[in-house]
Amino acid sequence: MNLTNLSIIESLSLLREKKVSATELVSSHIERIEKLDGELGAFLYIDHQGAIKKAEELDRRSDFSNTLSAVPFAIKDSILTSDMPSTAGSKILKGFVSPYNATVVEKIKNAGAIVLGKTNMDEFGMGSSTENSGYQKTLNPWDFARVPGGSGGGSAVAVAADLAVAGLGEDTGGSIRQPAAFTGTVGLKPTYGLVSRYGVVAYASSFDQVGPVTKNVLDSAYLFNIISGPDDNDATSLSYTQDYFSEIDMGELKGLKIGLPKEYFDEGIDRSIAEKVRWVAKHLESIGVEIVEVSLPHSGEALSVYYIIALSEASSNLARYDGIRFGPRAKSSSVVETYLKTRAEGFGAEPKRRIILGTYALSAGYADEFYKRAVAVRQLINQDFLEAFQKVDLLLGPTTPTTAFKFDSNATPLEMYMNDILTVPVNLSGIPALSIPIGLLGNLPVGLQIIGPRLGEKKIFQVAKKIEDMVGFDKLGEPYGIF
Amino acid sequence: MQNIAVQKIAELARITLTENDAATFESQVLEIIEFNADRLSKISDLPKKVEAVRISINSLSHLDEPKPSLSQELALANAAESLNGFIVVPKVLE
């Protein structure tokens, strides 16, 4: 039996029926990592021995009743773990081991999950291809010449290439959904506040959200039940809980109204991707869903608003990396020189660029023109979504303007930023969106994004499950690159 | 927009840039700033009153009671240099 292509639900079922042991499940993933990850580069740190030891302990107890008993996980490197290094993909945090676990890590560990290791990412989440990692490239398992998306390319590849059963990502402007779209996995950016940010390396605090990266929609809803919920350690977390999993097949889709935002299908979007999304919409129509066109008039400004506000927040958040309390310190005779040198040596080009842009946007004389104006336009973008959700229950569109692009194919940083054009509006508004694979173009996966109103995850999962059942992405084959 | 004093901004952000980096960043940063300025300047329906961004409703609050915190040992564990329970830093005052 192939144990590495199992979902969370399938793994738990086999463990509970005693058809597979925790050690077999974990060892098979470790072996696959050893065989493939030297080339794929999904992991920055792998805890081979710790994972096997935990699996053996679970086998000795022979109790797999916990909600994630022995399920092998991959965790994005910006999510803190007390027993493994957490670098957020940056050399400025090289060797950093957090004194505590992030709340989400605590939650999955308490549920019995076994963390295999930490996954590669663009430094501090700053990128759309994982090319900005301070450590290594991560290859897309569907085509090794192409990027896996970013910033969370490592977690997405770990799940897509069956190196882990599931993963945790973190989405500031699309860092869960865009890699999910590029690798044929399912990625959720939750409503802001539904998942605790405690112990998550801050990039842009009013955007960052942790979410599941999984092989299918069922796993996504199941894992979301476990990681979501209030946390005393995060003042922005919401006092709200919901069962997203049990009724995933019970939602009545007939009579549901779904909007296609016309701006998400304009000339900048690959025609073939737009057609595939419309083809899914037609399927939904055939089972009684009403499909209508809607408009989000300020979509064109979302990218600029994001790259002003997020970078302003980043310039402030990243001020803490000074070589004093954590991370390597450059040798110098004065404290200011220490800051200047440590940050020059520790940060890669993209964090430096973004810190400079953020510092500029907040500086005296420019804050009104940039930061304050961007905050005002963010309100308009939010208003667009609120108005759209008065007319429809959900929105549907492509996750990305193209399929996975080749390494080094964006000539300028601005060109790279353009890849986020369809994912950032959701982060600006704090609403949820799920990316699911709906087929292949050539040999590359295509992602569809379902956007819901605030706290609309339950309905998103129900529609996503229906689409997944109709489209049957898992039957389209395995990634080509690794076979 | 003519140019951006990248070196000055980098200094404010406490980052040393080489001359080569500064030259590359200057054109890239300028391109991004011009793009953003152009997009945002076209908006004619800016709200008259900008509300604070509503990050969350139903936010949590809890009693302000002291709880166990990080031990001194753990708090110092990642510092580049420590001595007798303190973080050692280079001279602050000349």
Image (cartoon, rainbow, N blue to C red):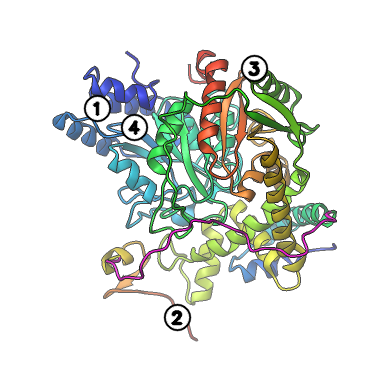
- The range drawn in magenta is B43-69
Looking at the image, do the residues carrying marks 4 and 1 touch, with CB atoms under 8 Å apart?
A: no
Rendered image: mark on residue A72: 4
Placement of A366 over or under A260, stated as above or below: below
Chain of the residue under label 3:
A
Q: Which numbered disc flags the more N-terminal residue, 1 or 3?
A: 1
Looking at the image, do the residues carrying marks 3 and 2 touch, with CB atoms under 8 Å apart?
A: no
Q: Whole-Å distance between the Cαs marked 4 and 3?
A: 35 Å
Looking at the rendered structure, the secondary structure element under dot 1 is helix
Quadrant of image for the N terminus of chain B: bottom right
Looking at the rendered structure, the secondary structure element under dot 2 is loop
Q: Which numbered disc flags the more N-terminal residue, 4 or 1?
A: 1
Residue lying at 57% horizontally and 39% vertically, measured from the top left: A150
The majority secondary structure of the magenta stretch comes to loop
Instruction: Please give left or right for residue A37 compared with residue A378 in the image.
Output: left
- Residue A409 in percent (x, y) is at 69, 35
**Mark 3, residues whose alpha carbon is within 10 Å: few (<14), some, or many (≥20)?**
some
Amino acid at pointer 2: Lys
State the residue position of label 1: A22
